[in-house]
Every structure is written in C-alpha cells, then in structure tokens.
Image (cartoon, rainbow, N blue to C red):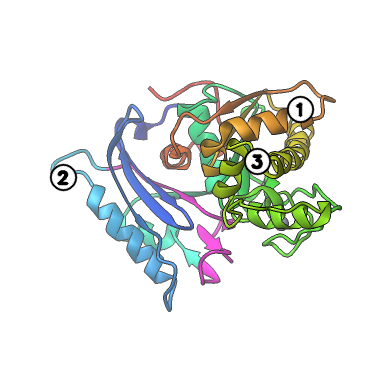
Amino acid sequence: MPATERDDQPVIAVDLGATTTRVALFGTGGEIIKKVSSSTPATGDSPEIVTLHLAGLIRKILPRKGGPSPAAIGISACGPIDHRRGSVVRPPNLPFREIPLAGPLGEEFGLPVRLANDCHAGVLGEVVFGSGAGCRNLVYITFSTGIGGGVICNGRLVLGREGNAAEIGHFHIDTTFNLPCGCGGTGHWEGYASGRFIPRFFARWCDLRGRIPGEIDNSSAAGIFAAARRGEPVALDFVRALGEINGRGVSNVIVAYDPSHIILDGSVVLQNEDLILSSLLPCVDRFLPLPEIRITALDGLAPLYGASVIARGYDTVVGPILPR
Ligand SMILES: [Zn+2]
C-alpha cells in the first residue's frame, strides 16, 4: 500500500459497536497512544446523540496542545453502512433510520473522515496488524451477537455497492430447522450459530431430535458450551450439530472467496475456541484446498486497528507494503 503524506501524523480510530464504542489515537507506527471506551447510546430522539457521543470520546484522546495534529478519522461501524453518504443506515440494534457520521464529525474536527463496516475494518486490522499480516487472500469471520465477514481478495478489500459485501452471516445453510434470522430471512447461518441465536437453535434441536436439556443452563451460549465442557452428552451432541452448521458456512466462504487464510474472531469463538474448531473442521468440504484457519491475535480490537488503517486512506487497496 502506498505511503502517503499523512503517514507522519497520528490518526483517530473509532469502533462504533452495537454495545460498546471505542476510540483511540494511533501513532505513526500503528501503536495505540491513548484509548477510551464507553457504552453506545441505545436510545434517544435523534441520531445526533450518537454523533455527539463520538465527538465527546474523540475530544478525550486528542493530542495535547502543541502535539502533532491528527491527519484523519477512520470509523468502523456496525452496519449496514452507506459508503457514499458516510452514514450507518437502518441499523438493527439502534433505533434510528440513518446515523450520519462522516459529515458531522468532519465538520466538527476539520478532518477527513472515512467509514467502513466493522467486518471490513476487522479484516484490514488483521491484514495489517494481526493474524493475517501480509496475506493477499484472507477472510475474517466474527462470531459474536451476529456473524459477519470481511474479505480481502487478490490484495483488495471486497467492498460491494455501498460497502456491505460479504454479509456471510446471511448465507443460507439449513432447511431442516428453518429458523428465522434477524434480517427476516430463514435458514441463515447467523440465525443458528451467533451468540444471540445459539440458545434458540439448541431449543429447536432438542425438540426436533427428542432430546431433554436436563440440567443444562440453556439461557445463553456460554451455559451450553459449559455443559459440553463438563461432558453432558446432550450438549456434546448439540456442539456436533453446531459444527455441521458452521462447517456449511465456512465451506461456502471457501468456495466463494478461495482464501489462503481464515481468521476467526468474536466472543463465541474466543471463549470456546476448542469446541468450535474441533466440531467445525471435520464438516468443512474439501472441494477446494482447506485454508489455514487462525484465531485473531488482536484481542477483540481488530475493527479498531482496522479503523486506523481506514483513516490513512487504505480503504480499497491493500498492497504488500505494511505500515512502518
Ligand atoms: Zn439473515
């Protein structure tokens, strides 16, 4: 990726998540100089509440007077986003039709603002700073409240029309359980294997397979995985069923993008790496060669790191040159 005149200035990175917002000042070597975080406003009369919240956090990490002034702001936002408008549009977890970000923040701070969806930011964070460093064909998959993906293909970030390509959580992967997805579709990966929907899949799977949950705390994904770790047969069999679902999702990712590496992130994977990997790997199709599957090394901060990459303008081309 080409060096730019902005590379000798710090940048501001924002990760606007559905529940937590993180803001950091990144130095020229990609190091975090200062970082703050806070809960994302979930209610309000106007989307301005989100913009004002972000502006307040950014002010907290600005360099002191006389310090080097930041070159730009990069934002990773839970989507969907509209790239051209610099907005989040119809966010499923926030009660607003549109949240304009680039316009108001650019005006407030007098800086260029660049925006990407959080999974696109995540894959940029991984390819520049994380487990995918230097890869030219890489897919980042996050399993948290939902399931999302970011793709770098032939060294380029796959953006799509408005910046929402690779919504892999909505791959169609099942016709047996027919579970609805948050998007309104049915049989989508996210409706089974995301943190939010694993308990519901467990309940439907028990129903359909005639299994009794017994003592298992099935109110959360954590309770079900804990039961599997204790060796409860019902939970272990369910984890195998979940592996089949994840295996279909990952198989689709492989034939769609032919990646050399897949990086897994998100709380569901990070807290249950052993169970998720051991159950999904036997279920992945081998039509194309199996990519190397790695776990993120960025400790949940891949989108924030990616936002610092976006701030520097590396939003479409990811070349072999890593930041200094
Ligand atoms: Zn869906």
Q: Position of residue 218 (x, y in %)?
A: 61, 54
Which residue is rendered at x = 32% and y = 44% of the image?
24
- In terms of sequence position, does the residue under pointer 2 or pointer 1 come before the other? 2
Q: Is residue 139 visible?
A: no
Q: Nearer the viewer, mark 2 or mark 1?
A: 1
2 or 3: tag closer to the N-terminus:
2
- Specify which label sits upstream in the sequence, 3 or 1: 3
On the rendering, which quadrant does ligand 1 occupy?
bottom right
Pointer 3 residue: 232
Position of 259 compared to 323: left or right?
right
Q: Say the numbered circle drawn on residue 90.
A: none
- How many numbered dots are placed on residues in this image? 3
Residue at image x 69%, y 27%? Answer: 259
Image coords of residue 124 (percent x, y): 52, 35
Quick one: quadrant of the C terminus? top left
Numbered tag placed on residue 64 in the rendering: 2
Q: Magenta part of the protein: which range?
A: 70-98
Residue 59 location (% of width, % of height): 25, 54
Mark 1 is on which residue type? Pro
Tag 1 residue: 282
Alpha-carbon span between mark 3 and mark 1: 21 Å
Residue type for callout 3: Glu
Residue 157 lies in the magenta-colored region: no
Question: In front: mark 3 or mark 1?
Answer: 3
Element type at mark 1: helix
Q: Quadrant of residue 53?
A: bottom left
The answer to whether residue 83 is magenta is: yes
Residue at mark 2 to residue at mark 1: CA–CA distance = 53 Å
Q: Is residue 12 above or below residue 97?
A: above
What separation in Å lies between label 2 and label 3 (alpha carbons)?
Answer: 56 Å
Determine the residue located farthest toward the left in the rendered image. 66
